[in-house]
Image: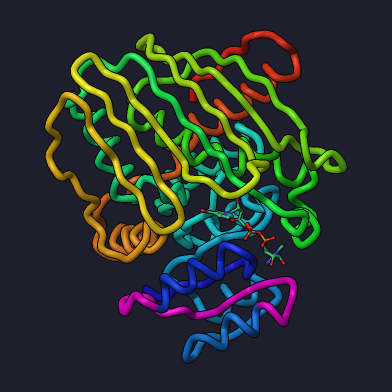
Amino acid sequence: MRLGVIGCGDICRYMLLMAKLNRRIRIAGCVDLDAGRAGKYASYFKGARAYTDYKAMIREQKPDAVYLAVPHCLHYPIMKELISSGIHILCEKPVATTLEDGAEIAELAAARGVKVGINYQYRYDKACYRMAVAARSGDLGQLYYGRGNVPWHRKEQYFSQSPWHCSREQAGGGTLITQGSHILDILLWSCQSRPVRVMGLTGQKKFTAVEVEDLCMAIIELENGCLLQLTSSMIASSEQPVTIDIYGSRGTATYKGGLLFSRTKFLQVRVPPYRPAAAGIHALGRSLEAFRRWIVLGEPYLCPVEESLPVLATVLAIYRAAQSGRPEKVPFV
Ligand SMILES: NC(=O)c1ccc[n+]([C@@H]2O[C@H](COP(=O)([O-])OP(=O)(O)OC[C@H]3O[C@@H](n4cnc5c(N)ncnc54)[C@H](O)[C@@H]3O)[C@@H](O)[C@H]2O)c1
């Protein structure tokens, strides 16, 4: 697969390392408004060219697909343009900053026959995958409730090096939309029921000069009655592992995942060693390889754009609840 890359910032560094380790992926071009970054990243790949204008890269390189890792507010306009050119996309989360824009992208992609995946790569974390498949396949019995905790640590540079992170308009929010949404995605995917109502509170404890929250706590009610609880923060005194627990009538799954390790323990039940189909040394690499297999071989990718819409709908409803001080409905998508 010939891949174009748009947005050579923080996450792109890791994704390009994954691409480098994948013999079946060739980087056609690297685009960034900062020519130095684009040039540096392109220099890692034989034959890759650097661009500051993504339209020029598309025109000249005609890649099979694009990996898009730009500020959240640019996901919608750039994807709209790429879809109209018939280019498949692996876009970083979230799909967009409004539900209308996200739904429009899903509709346009379906109408044009373009594949759009959203990189919620925890679906490709082996231990997370096993927990989610156990929940989805009934191994845990009837699901009662789930709980996720994201106790992450961000330094001042997180905002100073990427000022869009500070802006509600450009980022769409803070720790919930940017970090917690990964774990919300896993909880919703595991429980297979549509979110209907939320309660939520947000806080600004450490980063008080920015427009977005650094702490969020939420409760989410699903249509099947299952309840979810999510805490997302970027203010833990040091980066700590994500934990997710899912409690069912027959058994419990408890997941713990850090940068380099993850594991799920099952209590009371025996669960088969379910594994994601794609190979790779890290969830990011497996997500990229699974995206390639989707584009080239037509095998299913675990997070097509339409599956990211309930996550965005829930995130935005939590923000509304935090503002109104009341429970808020989650619109059907
Ligand atoms: N999946 C993950 O684990 C993960 C982790 C971190 C970030 N992300 C996501 O990746 C995306 C990017 O985040 P980041 O932390 O890398 O941000 P960043 O600020 O480090 O990088 C963004 C880059 O996009 C470039 N850019 C801005 N406008 C552009 C344009 N019009 N054309 C080309 N390039 C442009 C900027 O110059 C910058 O280099 C976000 O959606 C974020 O949520 C995902």
Residue 236 appears in view: yes
Residue 258 position in % (x across, y down): 44, 51
Residue in front for this viewpoint, 302 or 134: 134
Left-right relation of 269 to 233: left
Q: Does 229 sit above or below residue 282?
A: above
Q: Examine the image and state in which quarter residue 134 appears.
A: top left
Residue that appears at 47% across and 14% down: 221
Start and end of the magenta stretch? 21-37
Residue 211 in the magenta stretch? The answer is: no
Instruction: Point out residue 306 in the picture as x, y percentages from the top left corner.
Output: 44, 38
For the N terminus, the quadrant is: bottom left
Q: In the picture, residue 207 is in which quadrant? A: top right
The residue most toward the bottom is: 46
Position of residue 284 in the picture relative to residue 71 (left or right): left
Residue 11's place in the image compared with 122, above or below, is: below
Asked whether residue 36 is drawn in magenta, I would say yes
286 horizontally vs 51: left or right: left
Q: Give the percent coordinates (x, y) of residue 166.
A: 79, 47
Ligand 1 falls in quadrant: bottom right
Q: Nearer the viewer, residue 161 or 304?
A: 161
